[in-house]
Amino acid sequence: MTLASVLTTNLAILVLAGFIGFVVISKVPNTLHTPLMSGTNAIHGIVLLGGLLLIGLSGNDTFDKVILVIAITFGTINIVGGFLVTDRMLEMFKSKPKPKPDEGEDGHGPGSGKS
Amino acid sequence: MTVPLATSFLQHESFIYVLYIVAFSLFIQGLRGLAGPTTAVRGNRIAAVGMAIAVIATLLKPDEGNWGLIALGVALGAAVGVPAARQVRMTAMPQMVALFNGVGGGAVFLISWAEFRRTGGFSGIATYITVFSLFAAIVGSISFWGSNIAFGKLQEIIPGRPITLGAGQQVVNLLLLVLALAGAIDIAAGDHSEGVFIGVLVCAALLGNAVVLPIGGADMPVVISMLNAFTGLSAAATGIALNNPAMIVAGMIVGASGSILTNLMAVAMNRSIPAIVAGGFGGGGAVEGASGAGEHAGTVRSTTAADAAIQLAYANRVVVVPGYGMAVAQAQHAVRELTKELEERGVEVSYAIHPVAGRMPGHMNVLLAEADVPYDQLKEMDDANPEFQRTDVSLVIGANDVTNPAAKNTPSSPIYGMPILEVSDSRSVIVIKRSMNPGFAGIENELYFDPKTTMLFGDAKSAVSEIAAELAQI
């Protein structure tokens, strides 16, 4: 592929991903704002790949390697911490021994039939 | 003999690309899950699997190397990230997210810097790669420093109150932005000096500090969400610079969804994003109540039907407090449908009837009986009041004065001494009301300014029906 078509292909991916991001989060209950923020936060830990890609290439001097190791450390913290913390937060929503799924009604008097 | 064959297949460019496609599909699927209360846990795990696949795909690349350094970085990151995430208290969650967001931004600008040095100052590469790398460097640096300040404020290392330079603040911010952009344009135009690049990073860093320092503590969650979107965008830019589809998609969906989320959060707090970024408001937005609400400077929090539905669905015990608003809107049948739905989910529901609720004694009992509400669920005031303390959610539907704590607490109030339903004893309160207008007695209800209370504005019947519809989807 030519450089120009690499760019245009990537721009197309970028724009489509943007629309997906908009559509997926059109309606979120307030209760989930913090976990959702935390979850998307973990996803941008993808920057770790950048560190992994560059550190494998030749032409890095010692200082570059130091920067990249820090970048990889940061990226790993972002990913591991982000997903774990989101998981913990979301477990709180599950923890209630609630949903008695159906038919659990008894003795609440008349009118329990649904039309 | 088969080993080299298999290896070469795994390391084939197309195979790695396919793995990236799988990874970003999982990110999208996971994000969809995160947007709903029942699917969120799974959604988060699906996204985590996607991340693992993306990392493995990258490590499969034939030109990957320096394994010792990679292992060192990952081990350090895990050693910091895992215990931090495991041990943080739930109340400290926002600053933890800020910190994780900050390191993401930090990684972005460091990667951009390393790329600058490796290519001898972006020489011999396409201009668009230079431009996207510079964008990533600036936005990543802003996000890193801004997030660290946000963390410091929430952790109370830095005072939570706004710290500003006064009137000059906006000028300084603008100046820093212009300097960073000027440096970036200089580099894009062919200057290979590392000094200029570092200057750009420093200006962006100062800008990140200058933007977040003046913002008050109450607005911090919105700011963190905004910086989260920034880091996403900078990750996408890095993805374009490095021609990596997984980074482009993951970064961009975070950038886009983060922007929406930021807006949703601001709306839920009754604040506008420009007002938040302009800063200077210490305790967050104080919404004026009805005109002449002299003594109440508190905040009214509004909610949505979807939120109310979740709150109710996860409660153990719900008390409905009906009032005149329910009668006017003829909402009793909708209320009955809602409570039936809740009972089917195992929520214990009862109704607390104030003697003067509505416009005539027994008004509520009549209406509710009409809607087939079982008689034993209707509690008179004296029976209902001791029960509020073990109630998770009080759902106040069009009742006002009969819930006003001023009757108990404020001797100067015209309704002082009137017996009330003590809904403010329950763990949370949802008030369905048409507007902030005061009730029959024409006085403010301090219940609405209680931090436990959320307001769902609207006609009682349609609001209750909306909640029921949302509940059916949970």
Image (cartoon, helix red, strand yellow):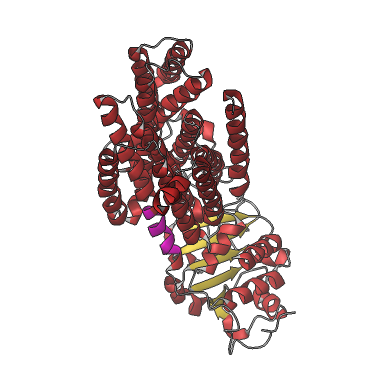
Q: Residue at x 37, y 16 (%)?
A: B120
Please give left or right for residue A114 compared with residue B36 in the image.
right
User: Residue B43, position in %: x, y?
Assistant: 50, 57
Does B431 sit left or right of B333 as displayed?
left
Locate residue B349, reporting x and y percent.
55, 76
Q: Quadrant of residue A51?
A: top left
Nearer-the-camera pick, B443 or A30: A30
In the rendered image, which quarter is residue B152 located in? top left
Q: Nearer the viewer, residue B97 or B452?
A: B97
Q: Which residues are magenta?
A: A84-93
- Asked whether the viewer can see residue B191, the reply is yes
Comparing B346 with B66, the one in front is B66
- Residue at image point 43% right, 20% down: B173
User: Quick check: A50 above or below A110?
Assistant: above
Kindly give the residue lying farthest to the front in the view shown.
B1
Q: Position of residue B157 (x, y in %)?
A: 26, 38
Magenta segment includes A105 = no
Q: Quadrant of the C terminus of chain B?
A: bottom right
Q: Is residue B365 above or below residue B119?
A: below
Measuring from the top left, give residue B12's x and y in whole percent: 48, 42
Give the main secondary structure, helix, strand or loop, of the magenta stretch.
helix
Quarter of the image where one finds residue A103? bottom right
Query: Is residue A92 shown in magenta?
Result: yes
Which residue occupies 53% across, 61% down? B39
Residue B439 in view of the camera: no
* Viewer-nearest residue: B457 or B352: B457
**Image: B455 above or below B379:** above
Total marks in image: 0
